[in-house]
Amino acid sequence: MSRNPDLESRRAIEQSRIRALMTAQRAGERAKLKIGPEHVAWVKEEMCIGCDQCTIVCDDNAIEVYPVKLRSPILDVDVNKKARILREPCTGCGLCVLGCPTDAIIMIDR
């Protein structure tokens, strides 16, 4: 895969901006989280909307987004996405939990 320095630079700036907002707005919530190497993030798939916010804030590349078909009696969508945590690279920092707009990510014991 080719690298795009401009895109990587913009992503880094966006990560910093989101982190600063989360630190200011959700500091109390982060204090209550189980964070650290003995914990790992977990995605509740039914609550995930595939917005990519968790992948933006994750420095460890511990989150991947994968396609899931969405089927219902009135709707059939082939481009629905869900997030998945990769346990090994996850450091348990909890940033993805704070970045998730639907509270679909929780921290669990490793």
Image (cartoon, rainbow, N blue to C red):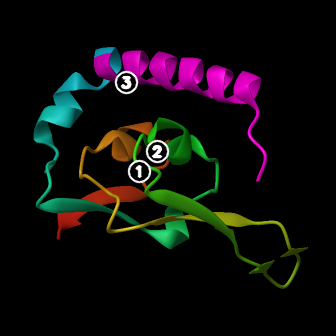
Local crowd size for mark 3, using a 10 Å CA cut-off: few (<14), some (14–19), many (≥20):
some
Amino acid at circle 3: Met
For the point 79% across and 82% down, the residue is: 71
For the point 17% across and 27% down, the residue is: 28
- In the rendered view, tell whether residue 91 sits above or below residue 71: above
- The answer to if 49 sits in the magenta stretch is no
User: Of the numbered discs in the image, which one, if any, rests on residue 103?
Assistant: 1
State the separation of the CA atoms marked 1 and 3.
14 Å
Name the quadrant containing residue 70: bottom right
Marks 1 and 2 in Cβ contact (< 8 Å) = yes
- The answer to if 18 sits in the magenta stretch is yes
Relative to 83, 43 lies left or right: left
Query: Label 3: which residue?
Result: 22
- In the rendered view, tell whether residue 38 sits above or below residue 92: below
Marks 1 and 3 in Cβ contact (< 8 Å) = no
Amino acid at circle 1: Asp
Labels 1, 3: front one: 3
State the separation of the CA atoms marked 2 and 3.
11 Å
Relative to 78, 15 lies left or right: left
Query: Mark 2 falls on what kind of element?
Result: loop
For the point 23% across and 52% down, the residue is: 92
Amino acid at circle 2: Cys
Dot placed on the residue nearer the N-terminal end, 1 or 3: 3
Relative to 24, 54 lies left or right: right
User: Of the numbered discs in the image, which one, if any, rests on residue 100?
Assistant: 2
- Span colored in magenta: 1-23
Residue 32 percent coordinates (x, y): 12, 40
